[in-house]
Image (cartoon, grey):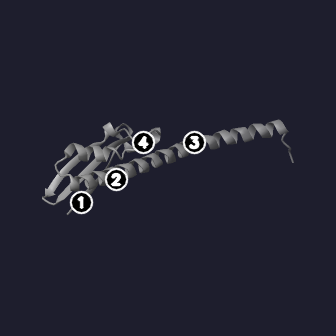
């Protein structure tokens, strides 16, 4: 039975740690990106709902509807939000909010294509 010296054992464990780190860091970054995407979609959904809520009371105030939606953009750049308003009939309003999500992790960006950009959108419909 051959025994390894303590220095040799420490060197091999350092190599094993480095290999494990090369695998773990991209996984953690991917989870981080996924969490960001879920958060942004949640904010976009809340923004659409708030815009529709405001719009059902103030139907002709387009700027107010957009501002109400943008006011819910906590943690996002409200100027990058696209707020679309439509009136399918006289008693209903539909507010659609979209936001461009950009992945930070290179392999997530490559999987998404288009430079790692993904448009997250949500639609809220309210009527009397």
Q: Are marks 2 and 4 in contact (CB under 8 Å)?
A: no
Of mark 3 and mark 4, the one earlier in the sequence is 3
Tell me what residue is drawn at x 30 percent, y 55 percent: 49
Furthest residue toward left: 90
Of mark 3 and mark 1, the one earlier in the sequence is 3
Furthest residue toward bottom: 128
Question: Mark number for residue 126?
Answer: 1
Residue at mark 4 to residue at mark 1: CA–CA distance? 26 Å
Q: Are marks 3 and 4 in contact (CB under 8 Å)?
A: no
- In the image, which is nearer the foreground, mark 3 or mark 4? 4
Q: Residues within 10 Å of mark 4 (few under 14, many from 20)?
A: few
Of mark 2 and mark 4, the one earlier in the sequence is 2
Q: Is residue 86 above or below residue 79?
A: below
Tell me what residue is drawn at x 57 percent, y 42 percent: 25
Q: Position of residue 115 (x, y in %)?
A: 37, 36
Q: Badge 2 is on which residue?
A: 45
Q: Secondary structure at mark 2?
A: helix
Q: Position of residue 17 (x, y in %)?
A: 68, 41
Left or right of 72 on screen, residue 19: right
- Nearest the camera: 56 or 23? 56
Left or right of 42 on screen, residue 63: left
Left or right of 120 on screen, residue 127: left
Q: Position of residue 127 (x, y in %)?
A: 21, 62
Q: Secondary structure at mark 3?
A: helix
Residue at mark 3 to residue at mark 1: CA–CA distance? 44 Å
Q: Are marks 3 and 1 in contact (CB under 8 Å)?
A: no
Residue at mark 2 to residue at mark 4: CA–CA distance? 14 Å
Question: Mark number for residue 25?
Answer: 3
Q: Position of residue 52 (x, y in %)?
A: 26, 54
Q: Is residue 123 above or below residue 16?
A: below
Of mark 3 and mark 2, the one earlier in the sequence is 3
Q: Badge 4 is on which residue?
A: 75
């Amino acid at each position: 039975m051959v025994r390894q010296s303590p220095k040799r054992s420490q060197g091999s464990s350092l190599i094993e740690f480095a290999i494990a780190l090369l695998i773990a860091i991209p996984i953690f970054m991917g989870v981080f990106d996924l969490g960001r995407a879920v958060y942004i979609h949640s904010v976009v959904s809340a923004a659409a709902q708030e815009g529709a809520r405001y719009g059902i009371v103030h139907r002709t105030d387009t700027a107010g509807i957009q501002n109400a939606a943008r006011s819910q953009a906590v943690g996002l750049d409200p100027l990058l939000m696209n707020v679309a308003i439509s009136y399918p009939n006289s008693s209903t309003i539909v507010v659609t909010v979209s936001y461009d999500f950009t992945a930070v992790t290179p392999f997530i960006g490559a999987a998404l294509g288009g430079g790692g950009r993904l448009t997250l959108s949500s639609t809220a419909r309210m009527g009397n």
